[in-house]
Image (spheres, helix red, strand yellow):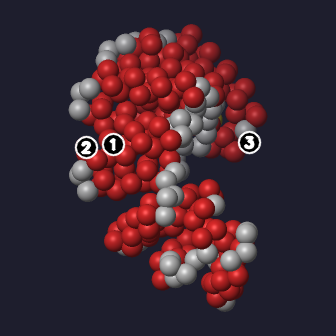
Amino acid sequence: GNLILAEKMLRKAQENSFVIAERHADLDFYDCGRFYLKNIEKIHPFYIANPFTGDLIVRIAEELAKAEEMKESKNLIEFALSRGVATSRMFNFMGLLALKEKREIDAIRLFHSAFKRDRKNAYPAIHLFFIYGGKGEYKKARMILDEALKFNPEYADLHNYKGIFYLDTGKKEMALREFKKALQINPFYLDALYNIAAIYESKRQLSKAMDMYLKIVQLRKITPHILGKIKQIWLGLKPSSRRSIKKKFRREARKNKELLTKWTVSYTHLTLPTN
């Protein structure tokens, strides 16, 4: 019913009908994609000229790709390109398709095209960072990351990846600085918390490492790996450090009733949750 209504809206070829049709299709982009491909030559030229169309086409193509309908996904992208629709997101998606097909050279070219079209779109830069890093071309990896940060200084992921770059090249202090920047932007950034904890642990700054791991727990990300880390570090702490951590944990637990019911702190040891 909703999809039929969407088709009627599309046929009217009114200025905003595709947006309305998308909503009536209940955001089922797979069905929208099937309809789009079936009636692709009948769609009013306005939709192809509309900047909104490029991102919508990519969203539909992504859903088709998820359903393993790669041929249909590519057909949709090729149709858009043949009509002059070329957005940053579209080239980024094409780069991902190239990577999936192990066409690395094509992927690099497409990601560069995507980033050139929109410097605010950091995703193609991140893909290039991992490609160059995986090939051992660290200078190129660093350059593309720095370029992305110029236009996206408040993007926590970029700071985290720059920290990973420094960590991989043996620069722990510089890595720690970038991970902290990521955490300042997003205090709930789990990857940054993990990375900071790992650096502190490697430097034998166990109290600081424990603090990071407990913050991860407070975000309700309790895993066997984290529990193992906490147990290991707890056993290596001095009594004075344990007392300090218990006080801080109690203070945080009072703010979080759920945390308080799952965790208890005694005077001699840290009791871990059983569930």
Which numbered disc, 3 or 2, marks the residue closer to the eye? 2
In this rendering, position of residue 141 left or right of residue 154? left
Instruction: Residue 254: give x, y in percent of width and height.
Output: 75, 33
Mark closest to the chain's N terminus, 3 or 2: 2
Instruction: Residue 201: give x, y in percent of width and height.
Output: 42, 19
In this rendering, position of residue 195 left or right of residue 51? left
| Relative vertical location of residue 91 with respect to residue 116 in this rendering, above or below | below
Give the Cα distance between marks 3 and 1.
Answer: 52 Å
In this view, the residue farthest toward the right is: 255
Mark closest to the chain's N terminus, 3 or 1: 1
Q: Can you see residue 150?
A: yes
Which numbered disc, 3 or 1, marks the residue closer to the eye? 1
How packed mark 3 is, by other alpha carbons closer than 10 Å (few <14, some 14-19, many 20 or more), is: few
C-beta proximity under 8 Å, tags 2 and 1: yes
Secondary structure state at the residue bearing disc 3: helix
Name the residue that disc number 2 marks: 105
| Relative vertical location of residue 20 with respect to residue 152 in this rendering, above or below | below
Q: Of residues 181 and 31, which is closer to you in this image?
A: 31
Name the residue that disc number 1 marks: 109
Instruction: Residue 246: give x, y in percent of width and height.
Output: 62, 23
Under mark 2, the amino acid is Ile
How packed mark 1 is, by other alpha carbons closer than 10 Å (few <14, some 14-19, many 20 or more), is: some
Give the Cα distance between marks 2 and 1.
Answer: 6 Å
C-beta proximity under 8 Å, tags 3 and 1: no
Name the residue that disc number 3 marks: 257
Secondary structure state at the residue bearing disc 2: helix
